Amino acid sequence: MSAARVRTRRIGDLEVTAIGLGSMTLTQVPGYDEERGLRTVHAALDAGVNLLDTADVYGPAGGGYGVNERFVARALKLYPGPTDHVVVATKGGHLRYAEHDTWWIDGSPEHLRRACQASLDRLGLDALPLYLHHRPDPRTPFEESMGGLKDLHDEGLIRRVGISNVDTGQIRTAHRVLGKALVAVQNEYSPRARGSEPEIALCEELGLAFLSWGPLGGMREAKALGSTYSAFNEVANARGVSPQRVSLAWQLHRSASIIPIPGASRPESVLDSLAAVDLELTPEELELLN
């Protein structure tokens, strides 16, 4: 069976849908449409999605911390069906200064502990199903940051650990410090951002999930994917589907470790993304896309 036909994939001991929902897009624009966002999350849940990705710093300019996390928590609370099976992955390690809406990084164990506790409070959880270190801090040794996450895991505040925006050396360091607690790497990967091939290969070697963020080229570029990358447009036109669907199917074929987490702000976008699991690409199409 090809990778694209597998509807679920593994993050450690978890079985999740092969395509998750990146929640950042739902609240990132000032004056975001909250009701449409709720319909979008609920459409994903209706379709069987059980992986939602968020972070403590996601939200509109000047919104402070936790806007997106609180939105995700509210969407789950208002959903009429069961949600116990839904995995909320959140991230910490960024700072966000409201006055100028600038971001910086703090990977110190002290900050990660504070950020973790704040995320627990906002999401209303006793333990975070998957907590990711958002970005390496040039002022804090990476091993020290990983040690802080190990402490949080050993104390039961986080059940599984992930790392984001990392290279192969940092993945190996995290794997050495965290052992089996490390289950995922989240890096950018898309038709325009293919620099994480070595990290994908290492995830395959170590049995880690690779959560691709920005799999459609990013929030500002997703709509133009077809016009920017002619190969994806060519395959999409031949199949009668969107270039975005082709991009996600291409990633699912690329590696069984990849779990794309495309953003969406409309229910229609969610359903189009999920249809990628049924798009079987031919070797000739894959050669063209690669």
Image: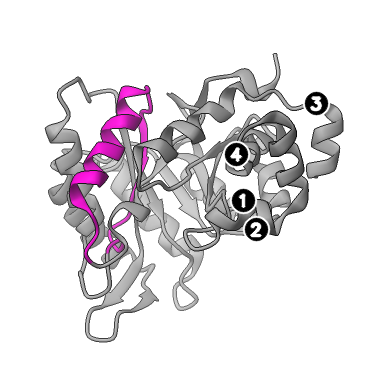
Q: In this view, does 285 lie to the left or right of 217?
A: right
Residue 163 seen in the figure: yes
Query: Helix, strand, or loop for circle 3?
Result: loop
Instruction: Judge depth for marks 1 and 4 and give the one in front.
Output: 4
Give whichever of discs 3 and 4 has the lower sequence position: 4
The amino acid marked with disc number 2 is Gly
Q: Residue 282 carries which label?
A: 3
Give whichever of discs 3 and 2 has the lower sequence position: 2
Image: 166 above or below 126: below
Query: For the view shown, which residue lies furthest in the top direction?
Result: 1
Residue 205 seen in the figure: no
Give whichever of discs 1 and 3 has the lower sequence position: 1
Which residue lies under the disc numbered 1? 172
Q: Residue at x 13, y 49 (%)?
A: 121
What distance separates the C-alpha of mark 1 from that of mark 3?
34 Å
Mark 2 residue crowding within 10 angstroms, few (<14) / some (14–19) / many (20+): few
- Pick the quarter of the image with the N terminus: top right
Instruction: Judge depth for marks 4 and 2 and give the one in front.
Output: 4
Give whichever of discs 1 and 4 has the lower sequence position: 1
Which residue lies under the disc numbered 2? 169
Query: Helix, strand, or loop for circle 2?
Result: helix
Tell me the quarter of the picture where residue 161 sits.
Answer: top left
Mark 3 residue crowding within 10 angstroms, few (<14) / some (14–19) / many (20+): few
Contact, mark 3 vs mark 2 (Cβ under 8 Å): no
Q: Which stretch is magenta? A: 31-59
Tell me the quarter of the picture where residue 95 sits.
Answer: bottom left
Q: Which of 120 and 100 is in front in this view?
A: 100
Residue 123: give x, y in percent of width and height.
18, 45
Q: Residue at x 74, y 27 (%)?
A: 281
Query: Helix, strand, or loop for circle 4?
Result: loop
Instruction: Judge depth for marks 3 and 4 and give the one in front.
Output: 4
